[in-house]
Image (cartoon, grey):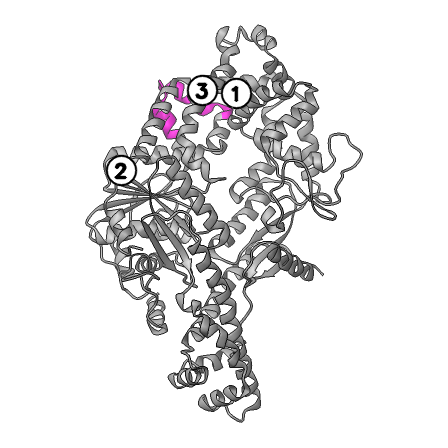
Amino acid sequence: MNPDGLAELISGKEMVVTVGSGGVGKTSISATMALHAASTLGIKVLVITVDPARRLADALGVAGLGNLESQVSESAFNSAGLPIRGELWAVQLDTKRSWDDLVMRYAASEEEAFKILENPLYQGFSARFIQSHDYIAMERLYDLHSQGNYDLIVVDTPPSRNAVDFVEAPKRVQEFFGGRLLRLLTVPYRVGGDFGGRVINFAAKPFYRIADQILGSQFLEDIAEFFLSFQSMYEGFTRRAAAIETLLKSRQTTFVVVSTLEPAAFAEAQYFCELLTRNSMPVGALILNKVLPEYLLDVELGRKAELLSDSSLSKSVAASIGVAGEKDKERMLSRVLQEIAENFTNFQTVALREAEEERSMRYRPDVVAKVPFVPTDLVDLDGLSKLASGLFGDGSGEGGTGEKGLTPPADLEARRQGRGRR
Amino acid sequence: MADLFAVPAFGAQPEEIQPNLYGLTIDTELALREYLKLNMKIPMMGRIGTLARIFDFVATAAPGVKEILTIGKISWEAGLDGRESSEWDLIVVDATATGHIVGQLNAHRSIREMVSVGIIREQTEEMAELLEDPGRTGVVLVATPEEMPVSETIDLYGRFTELTNVDIAAVVVNRVLPELFTKAEAEIFEGMRDPSVTELLADYLGHDATPMLDAAELAVTLRRTRGEHLKRLRERVPLPMYYVPNFFVKSQGLRITRLVAQALSEELS
């Protein structure tokens, strides 16, 4: 493991795309990487989030801002005790509004744009088309990147129904708008012009006949009309989708896969790594989040845990803490000792399982970084700064679990001080 | 899901997992083929293939179509479509992700708004009746006591009550940590952080015992943080709540399923 690898990786890229399954802390990690880059490098950084926790959105100052980019204030950095050399900007992606903007911008004319925006199917499409969230995130990314206003863009990808959706969104949209099936579907409406030829063509094909029976012709007409009005934008869509794909596969971009060592999340992360690689999208780093402290892996101590139940030990401790002779407190103490032992064994079981999970890693990118488990919520700037010390090993107290800067918390006192700052 | 029962992955047809328990996976493309076969009485499978591909394309584009296929398949298993009764006494659906579930359960509404005639409209009416009858259908929200899952559950509860007529039966909170110490015990534990006690323990064990104390502190802090989220959940979601403890076990498959099942049946009784 290369502890400086992540910082190096990020500083050398223009775009960092974070992927991972739900609940692994992907949004916090994205925000942390952006925060760290803005804090340590003299560059202008933008983080694109999709659905951050309210407190995180508040911390970044993007809550309720819709699609507008906003700068995280210097005072926010100061209050979190962070230096700031560059600038940090954040934007929260609004799927619906982004689609609307896209239509307004790329439709052949204003009239055409309004026709699309008013189509009853458009609303459902922009909000619910399975890949529309993934796709629009990519469109926004492309757009923001080509404006050239930022040195680094960190993208927190939307939670997908499955891993393939996101990676394949540009390709799928290209296929969708440029495909044979779409032409086939709209043929009856195009041939006769103005829906005139519909009757003949419609009845002639078994598909249309069956579709008519099941869905009703009005619905089919609505669908066709929607696609036809989108037609003016097909070319732009396919062209940009191709450009986005090129950008994602370029050396300017890196993918960072985030996971915990929970079996399901980890298996999915491994699948992500393989899938991205198969699609020629470079996986620069794997970040293992919420990794239990290494001290839990002390198997010898685990074996000795049951000694805490010894009555002679309990007596000595009672004397040491000054409760000897107080029957109630002595009983309590002996229960506390048992709880401590049982708790250690419990956490050790999980820690050992996770360590085993990590050893079984099939796909290992050049950079594997670990972030220690923190039992409190890390959703404000202060929390993110702690996460940054864990991730990049800034040595500001909260420590990580790797080598050099990524070392486990030195002792409890340091962790207490860390918490005391909150 | 199959891993949780230590069986090979289920197909699209019900497969016996153990006596009285069957599993199946919903595949919308297969569901569509099945649907076309049942409704259109098309004999040739090859033909259905092409049709199904085109329909699948329409389903991808048109909001609600894919969702209604899923609901349609569930309704079919529940005995709709003019049959006398269902083959099953209880159907448990592991539903789609939080962000999509309201859309899925509301798919019949989108269809009703968009499709004015056709077989599918009549069928969606039946599905709506099934979904919106609290005697037959109930939604169970599942959360863990952490920041994001609790916020999402609160949000989901709001959207459910606002946007659907589907009954929410209960909330199951998974991975609840036990209270390690009572208040009085916590004071004793604090006293044990004194270096003299740490040394005493190390002497007795012949090994540094600090990690055990650190682990106990970790558990206490975690329990406290999670307790706050749990409190927030209880305040904001006024539903019966059932708790499943966090299990510290090595294996993840059937063993966990059995432990959770046991914990749930104790909670329910």
Residue at screen point 52% across, 83% down: A333
Q: How many marks?
A: 3
Judging depth in this view, the residue of B250 and B168 nearest the camera is B250
The answer, for residue B184, to whether it is visible in the render is: no
Q: Amino acid at mark 1?
A: Ile
Q: Is residue A85 left or right of residue A1?
A: left
Q: Which residue is mark 3?
A: A179
Q: Earlier in the sequence, mark 3 or mark 2?
A: 3
Q: Which residue is mark 2?
A: A251
Q: Which residues are magenta?
A: A100-121
Residue at screen point 62% across, 16% down: A212
Res A278 quadrant in image = top left
- The circle drawn on residue B64 is none
Q: Same chain, marks 3 and 1? A: yes
User: In the image as oriented, which residue stretches furthest toward the bottom?
Assistant: A325
Q: Amino acid at mark 2?
A: Arg
Task: Answer few, some or many: residues within 10 Å of disc 3's Cα (few below 14, many 20 plus, some between 14 and 19).
Answer: few
- Element at label 1: helix
The answer, for residue A60, to whether it is visible in the render is: yes
Task: Answer few, some or many: residues within 10 Å of disc 1's Cα (few below 14, many 20 plus, some between 14 and 19).
Answer: many
